[in-house]
Amino acid sequence: MALVVVCGQPCSGKSTAALCLAEALKESNVKQAVKIINETSFHLDRNQSYADMPAEKNLRGVLRSEVDRSVSEDNIVIVDSLNSIKGYRYELWCLARGAGIRYCVLYCDVEEIHCRKWNDERRENGEANYDDKIFEDLVRSGRLEVEGCKDLTANDRDSEYSIIGGNSLYELDKATHEVVNAIVEAQGQAMGGPLNGVPLGQDLPTINISKSVGLPELRRLRRTFIKLTGQTSLSGPPPPCDAASAKRMFVDYLNRELGTA
């Protein structure tokens, strides 16, 4: 149903905020299961996880994979980590978009002096805390800040491209999502039995699959197709701006990738 990404400085109360949100959701008797994903979920030590760039990159990969497995209409997923890199938050947004669920960012806006104080108090109480060197590296990295920004002035060409590109990407995203939903629905109706193709409607090709394809695999294929289409449009024609063309292209791609065309 939703993906909530908690971010902020180290020791800014992110875990407390995530826990409070989870408890509030449970008390509101939501039908969906509430799940918190963080370093503790995998018994990872925070100082080891942020010791260097390779370790931090590995941590992000572990968390992202777990988010990809967990996002669905039946879950409310809360990602409790630094999540300070904009590109990484965009990757999580893509996972939520691919699953057809809502996405939001919860930022813990706490002054640096309080973060330092809370980290020292945790160390004195024998609770989980950051080593001084790692804390300094994280809190001073400036990854949550954007410096030297200037307002961009769009010219006529930029405005025209943004309108065309925005419509195309919207139609592409919507159309591919509908195709994935059609496959999932057809497989559910088949109840594990063989499929004789999945029709999408008049003037549209049939999805030629005879065996079940898991939702994670469908999501992966969908993301790859959108990425490839975007890359192609940089040097060639723009993405299709109508749903029928987008569906036709995606079905052709699926038939090739699944080896049944």
Image (cartoon, grey):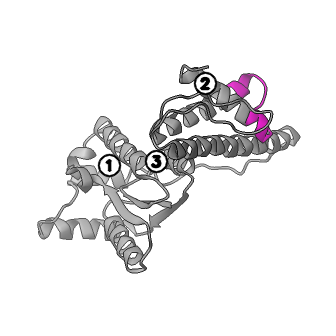
Residue at (38, 43) in percent of width and height: 65
Q: Residue 16 at x, y = what percent?
A: 32, 70
Q: CA distance from mark 2 to mark 3?
A: 36 Å
Q: Out of 90 and 23, give the one closest to the viewer.
A: 23
User: Is residue 250 left or right of 41 when viewed as pictured?
Assistant: right
Q: Which residue is mark 2?
A: 255
Span shown in magenta: 231-246
Secondary structure, mark 1, is helix
Residue 217's tag is: none
Which residue sits at x=56%, y=36%?
A: 223
Other-residue count near label 1 (Cα within 10 Å), few / some / many at <14 / 14–19 / ≥20: few
Q: Is residue 244 magenta?
A: yes
Residue at screen point 54% across, 46% down: 189
Instruction: State the separation of the CA atoms marked 1 and 2.
Output: 48 Å
Q: Callout 3, which amino acid?
A: Ile
Q: Which mark is residue 85?
A: 3
Q: Which residue is mark 1?
A: 137
Q: Are marks 1 and 2 in contact (CB under 8 Å)?
A: no
